[in-house]
Amino acid sequence: MRPRIGYKKLAAVGVAAVVGVASTIALTSGSASAAPVFGYSGYAFGTDVQAGVVGHGPQVVAQFSCTTDSNRSDQNDLATANVNNQAIARTVTTDTHSFNNQHGNGVTSNATAVDIRIGSLLTLTGAKTTTTAVYKNGNLSYTGSTTFASVKIGGVSVPSLVKPGPNTKVAVPGLGYIVLNRVGGVKTSAGIYSYAQAVVLHATTKNRYIPKGVDVAVLKTRAEITKPATAMVIGDAYGTKAYVDKLVKSGPTSYQATCQGTEGKTIRNAVAEVVIPKVAYVGAIYTTKNGYMGAEKSAVNFTSHVAGVKVGNLSIGAIESSASAWKTKDGKVGLNSSSNVVSIKVGNKSYNVPTEPNSTLDIPGVAKLTFNQVVRQSRYISVNALVIDVYSLNTKVIVGHSAAGVIG
């Protein structure tokens, strides 16, 4: 069982997959081989707040991102997943895995719960959701489904909803409405991703369980596969991530990643202010990604933007980073990164901000700051604009992360 990941005052926009720092992105060797590669990515969450303000982010997380390993897998479990300090889903398990077998190349993600309850308003037992994205014989396809052992609304059994059709909307008196078996898939020029969610709770009525205006996905899965390509673009970006020792205290905020690029479109993901409990207050955050895979050139760019961070008496101004990578058909590879931190203050005292890669500033009794932390490989680069090691809390906070690379 893993520690729960908590965000406070989080307004999520779009889909965020929680993954680790740059080292979790799996690369092949730096060989100039043009052998085709596939990109695999997937996740499964127990619960995830999709809109509104509530005190946590994704829970019971199983995930991997942008790997070429067809045997990658992850799994997780938790006795109870909570929303707004209410037990929403019990005995939750999640898993995701890639494969290359007679069914093709693909990813499958699953999530189950013994029951999902909103007091006496809604009871879903034996819940299971799954989605698969596959490439086989030149074709892209996906499947997704959700089933329940039983469904009760307001204490009344509704057998017709045990195997709901896709995106079935049902009113729940005292809560608002729910969408059962929310499924879909999106094809791009580079691949396909699919999603499936057992139930999305929409609290449109004041109630004691979920704040009005909040949407929560319970048992949320995603699977992604790329077409074979001579160069796959990869990368990720997030605003903040916090650790205590090696344990995640707060997962990536405003997270974005890719295994397919974006067909040349800039995609933005934003969150409102974030409170990392007992550690830091973080201002508004947004990240961007833009990438494409083509016959002449493949390229990708990620950026991260944070309005500011406060850790005790330590006040940090706006923070930004970017990372980009490209490869041309003749094998040439380019990598670039940049970062910027506007200001550092402790109380009324200001400090100069170093600009050289991996520069440090030790503020006795407060924190050690590392600026422009860069990791560079032959086809991959990552940058953390700022890393804060908080002495009194034995906590590390990464701020302004961007990474980009090419495989193939």
Image (cartoon, grey):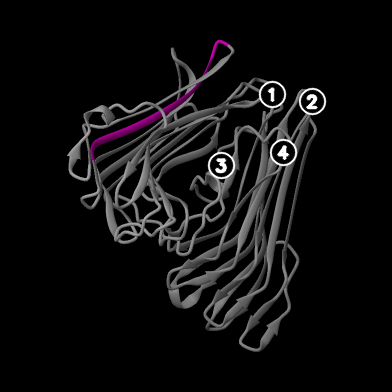
Q: Are marks 2 and 3 in contact (CB under 8 Å)?
A: no
> Which residue has dot 1 on it?
230
**The magenta stretch spans which residues?**
124-137
Q: Earlier in the sequence, mark 4 or mark 1?
A: 1
Let me know if residue 31 appears in the view.
Answer: yes
Tell me if mark 3 has few (under 14), some (14-19) or many (20+) residues whose alpha carbon lies within 10 angstroms of its own: many
Q: Which mark is residue 352?
A: none
Asked whether the residues under the numbered discs 1 and 3 touch, taking CB atoms below 8 Å apart as contact, a structural biologist would say no
The residue located at (44%, 56%) in the rendering is 213
Q: Which residue corresponds to mark 2?
A: 329
Q: Which residue is mark 4?
A: 265
At x 55% / y 38%, what residue is drawn? 26
Q: CA distance from mark 1 to mark 3?
A: 18 Å
Mark 1 or mark 3: whose residue is earlier in sequence: 3
Report, in whole angstroms, how far the alpha carbon at label 4 lies from the one at label 1.
21 Å
Mark closer to the chain start, 1 or 2? 1
Taking depth in this image into account, of 183 and 350 the one nearest to the observer is 183
